[in-house]
Image (spheres, helix red, strand yellow):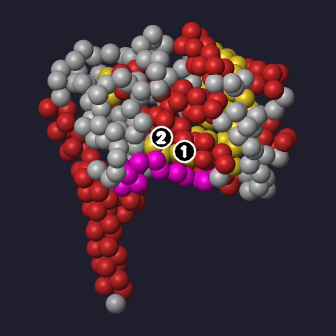
Amino acid sequence: MPEIRNAVTVITGASSGIGKATALEFARAGARLVLAARREEALEATARECRALGAEALAVPTDVAEEAEVEALARAAIDRFGRIDVWFNNVGTGVFGPYWEAPAGLQRKVVEINLIGTLHGSSAALPHFIRQRGGVLINMCSMGGWSPTPFAASYAASKFGIRGFSASLRQELTGYPGIHVCALFPALVDTPGLDRAANLSGRALEPKAPYLTPEAVAAVVLRLVRRPRGEVAVGWTASAARIAYGLAPRLTETVTGALIRAALRRARRVPRTEGAVARPIAAGTSPRSGKPLPHVGGPSLGSLALGGIGLLLGAELLSGALTRRR
C-alpha cells in the first residue's frame, strides 16, 4: 500500500460532497491530488483549498460518462506526477420517483454516470497499477448496493452493479497482491447530493434518519488506502441493511417500501426537477448540504430495528431448516 504522503491520488466528483471532503482529507495528509468533476470553476475552488493546505493539486474537468475524458484524466495524472497510486471512483447521482414517470434517457444517464463511470475510471487506472504492480482502487457504492431503494430503481441498479463489478475485479487481480479493489458502502450522508439529484416525485427529499458527515466518510477512505479491505460499510444503517437483506430479503423489501411510501405521503410538495443528472448546475459546492440535519452519534432506532428484524428472521429460517433436516 502506498504511503499517503506524496501518493498520487485521483478523486472524481471532487467539486462537492464526499469527493471534496476526501480531497481536503488527503491534502492534509500530504497526498498529491488530481481532482475531477464536470464543473470547472467549482473544481478549481476545491484545488485551491487543497493547495492552501500545502498539497499539490491538479484540477481536470471531466465527465466520467465519457470514456475519452476519463482517459485524458489518467494521462494528466501521469504527465504531471509520473504515476497513479490511488483512484477513487466517487461520482454518483440518482433519479427519485416512480420509475415509469421519469424519461428513459434520464434513467440511463444515472447508470452511465454511476456504473459506466466507475468502469471507465477502473479501465483508466488499472493498466498503471499493473505496470507498477501496486495501487488502490476505491469504488463508491452505497447502502443501496446491499439493499433495494424503492423509487430510485436506476440508482439501485447502478449500485448493485458496482458491487458485483468490484467483487469480480478483485478475483481477476488475485495475481497482483499489491493491487487492491475496495467498495465503500456509506449510509445516508449530509451532502448537496439530494438537492442535485433528479426528483420527479413532486415531494421533498428530506429523510429523517441521522446523517453521516462527508468528513467521516473521507476519513474511512483514507484508512482504506492504509489498510485496504474488499467491502466496507460506513454507518450503522448500512450495516443493518446488509444484515437485514442478507437474511430476510422479502421482509426487508416490504418494510423499506412501506417506510418510503409513508414518508412520501407526509413530505411537502415541491416542483419536479431533473437536477444535475443530465447537465451540471451551479448549486452545491460544499462538502455538506448546509441544512440543519441530525448527524450520526450512534445506532439509530430504525437501523437497529432493521438489523434486529434481519437477525431474528435469519435465526427463524435457520431453525426451520434444521427442523426440516431432522
Side of 35 where 257 appears, left or right: left
10 Å crowding of disc 1: few (<14), some (14-19), many (20+) = some
- The residue carrying mark 1 is 220
Apparent side of residue 279 relative to residue 172 in the rendered image (left or right): left
Magenta region, residue range: 228-240
Tags 2 and 1 in contact by the CB under 8 Å rule? yes
Kind of residue at disc 1: Val
133 or 81, which is in the foreground?
Answer: 81
Where residue 173 appears, as percent x and y from the top left, is 73, 51
Q: Residue at x 80, y 36 (%)?
A: 128
Residue 201 is situated, as x and y percent measured from the top left of the image, at: 25, 25
State the SS at label 1: helix
Q: Which residue is mark 2?
A: 216
Residue found 47% across the figure and 17% down from its top: 285
Image quadrant assignment for residue 245: bottom left
- Distance between mark 2 and mark 1 Cα atoms: 7 Å
What amino acid type is highlighted by mark number 2? Ala
| Nearer to the camera, 219 or 64 | 219
137 drawn magenta: no
* Rendered position, 315 above or below 68: below
Q: Quadrant of residue 192?
A: top left
Q: Residue furthest left?
A: 266
Residue 14 seen in this snapshot: yes
Image quarter where the C terminus lies is: bottom left
Q: Residue at the spot x=34%, y=39% of the render?
A: 295
Question: Where is residue 282, by image quadrant?
Answer: top left
Q: Position of residue 40 (x, y in %)?
A: 59, 11
